[in-house]
Image (spheres, helix red, strand yellow):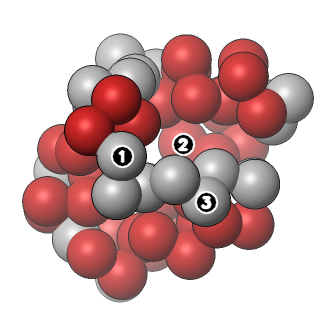
């Protein structure tokens, strides 16, 4: 899986549950909330003041390993 700004948080977690800590690091502690699962990576980053590309790069690097 390749994560983009339009990838849903739920899709990332479904593909690899070990990515949860990246969301926790950015302050997104509500991963179990149905609304968060339907947010895109870009939307979540905007809400939490995190550069989207930074998170995308971390997720893709982690998932490629």
| Circle 1 residues within 10 Å: few <14, some 14–19, many ≥20 | few
Q: Secondary structure at mark 3?
A: loop
Q: Nearer the viewer, residue 39 or 2?
A: 39
Q: Position of residue 14 (x, y in %)?
A: 14, 59
Residue 55 visible in rendering: yes
Q: Which residue is mark 3?
A: 29
Q: Which mark is residue 56?
A: 2
User: What residue do we see at 43% from left, 55% from top?
Assistant: 31
* Left or right: 21 as drawn, with respect to 65: right
| Circle 3 residues within 10 Å: few <14, some 14–19, many ≥20 | few
* Left or right: 44 as drawn, with respect to 41: right
Q: Nearer the viewer, residue 51 or 17?
A: 17
Q: Position of residue 57 (x, y in %)?
A: 58, 49
Disc 2/disc 3 C-alpha distance (Å):
18 Å
First along the sequence among labels 1 and 2 = 1
* Left or right: 48 as drawn, with respect to 59: right
User: What residue do we see at 18% from left, 44% from top?
Assistant: 11
Disc 1/disc 3 C-alpha distance (Å):
9 Å
Q: Secondary structure at mark 2?
A: helix
Q: Which residue is mark 1?
A: 33
Question: Is label 1 or label 2 in front?
Answer: 1
Question: Is label 2 or label 3 in front?
Answer: 3
Question: Residue 62 occupies which quadrant of the picture?
Answer: bottom left
Q: Nearer the viewer, residue 27 or 50?
A: 27
């Amino acid at each position: 899986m390749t994560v983009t700004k339009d990838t849903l948080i739920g899709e990332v977690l479904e593909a690899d549950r070990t990515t949860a800590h990246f969301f926790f690091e950015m302050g997104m502690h509500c991963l179990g909330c149905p609304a968060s699962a339907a947010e895109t990576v870009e939307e979540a980053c905007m809400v939490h003041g995190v550069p989207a590309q930074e998170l995308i790069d971390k997720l893709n690097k982690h998932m490629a390993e």
